[in-house]
Amino acid sequence: MFEPILEKIAAYDTVILHRHAKPDGDALGSQIGLKHLILENFPGKKVYTVGDVAGRYAFMADSVMDTVPDEAYQNALSIILDTSARHLISDDRYALAAATARMDHHLFVEKIADTEVVAPDYESCCGLVADMARQCGLRLTPLAAQSLFTGMATDSGRFRYDGTSSRTFALAAHLTQQPFDMNAIYTSLYANDVEQVKLRARFTLKMQLTGHRVAYIYTTKEEIAAEGADPFMISRAMVGNMADLNGVDIWVNFTETDENVLCELRSNRCNINPVAVKYGGGGHPKASGATVKNREEAMAMLRDLDQMTEGENQ
């Protein structure tokens, strides 16, 4: 499965690594991890990481992106990581490259690259990259292992989501043969300051339930402005406030921006991905996202989720 990707890497002196915008730990972890795998196993290669800023995950080593001129793509290979659709890629210059490849673990939406490894049965893109290293005998460095472990931990919900399997733990064990500080990773992931805790409390109080117990939070752009918060942070961070509620199988966080409404959909039982896809999004069976035009479309999505829950409970 991995040989075509490795053949592409071997064929190009310059490799430029892309991932989705507004990165999470898996996007950055797969990007940084693959960078250091290539540098360790293919001496003499130039490897760059590009995209928007790391944000919440800026604690990850080597998470500052490179500044790459357009001409660098002329004879380069672009690899897109952890991304299911073109419009989600951070820095669309990947299309300027002489060749393109993709490694992804999301449900397939569309073909993006010349060479593709798309495997939705992996809990994370980092797990996919780690398995390539393990199966193909690539040498790990501590930084590569640390980055890949971080992405596996975050995208698996600290190894508790459904995608977690015996393979997940085998890959984690393989990575932890390298020396890195696991406690430092978890300290960074769980760290909150007092104002963040208060912010979460205020948003939790906004939670509502539909007739069939879909939990949701809807935040207007005026409320975002009053909090002085970043809508993208609110979109991702606050959806977790509704997890682990008795009798709630689906929850969704709606966050207005100046242009649209960000939607983060989650479930502990139902496959909510078809609803996300219906509204132009995608992701995983139990964790998906979409962006809709306005509140009316957001409420239409909520009604679809409510009907899904009604069907599940009959």
Image (cartoon, rainbow, N blue to C red):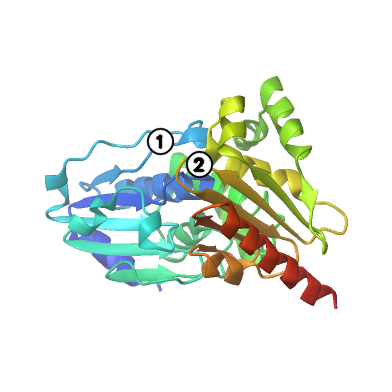
Q: Position of residue 221 (x, y in %)?
A: 56, 37
Mark 1 nearby-residue class (10 Å; few <14, some 14–19, many ≥20): some
Q: Position of residue 282 (x, y in %)?
A: 52, 64
Of the numbered discs 1 and 2, the one sitting upstream in the chain is 1
Mark 2 nearby-residue class (10 Å; few <14, some 14–19, many ≥20): some
The image's mark for residue 279 is none
The image's mark for residue 53 is 1
Looking at the image, residue 101 sits to the left or right of residue 159; the answer is: left
Who's the residue at 40% across and 63% down the image? 85
When the figure is inspected, residue 67 is found, relative to residue 131, above or below; the finding is above
Looking at the image, residue 304 sits to the left or right of residue 29; the answer is: right
Who's the residue at 58% across and 33% down the image? 222
What is the quadrant of the N terminus in the image? Answer: bottom left
Numbered label tally: 2
Q: Position of residue 272 (x, y in %)?
A: 65, 67
Q: Which residue is mark 2?
A: 257
Q: Quadrant of residue 111?
A: bottom left
Mark 2 residue element: loop
Tell me the mark number nearer the camera, choosing from 1 and 2.
Answer: 2
When the figure is inspected, residue 226 is found, relative to residue 269, above or below; the finding is above
Q: CA distance from mark 1 to mark 2?
A: 19 Å
Q: Is residue 205 visible?
A: yes
Mark 1 residue element: loop
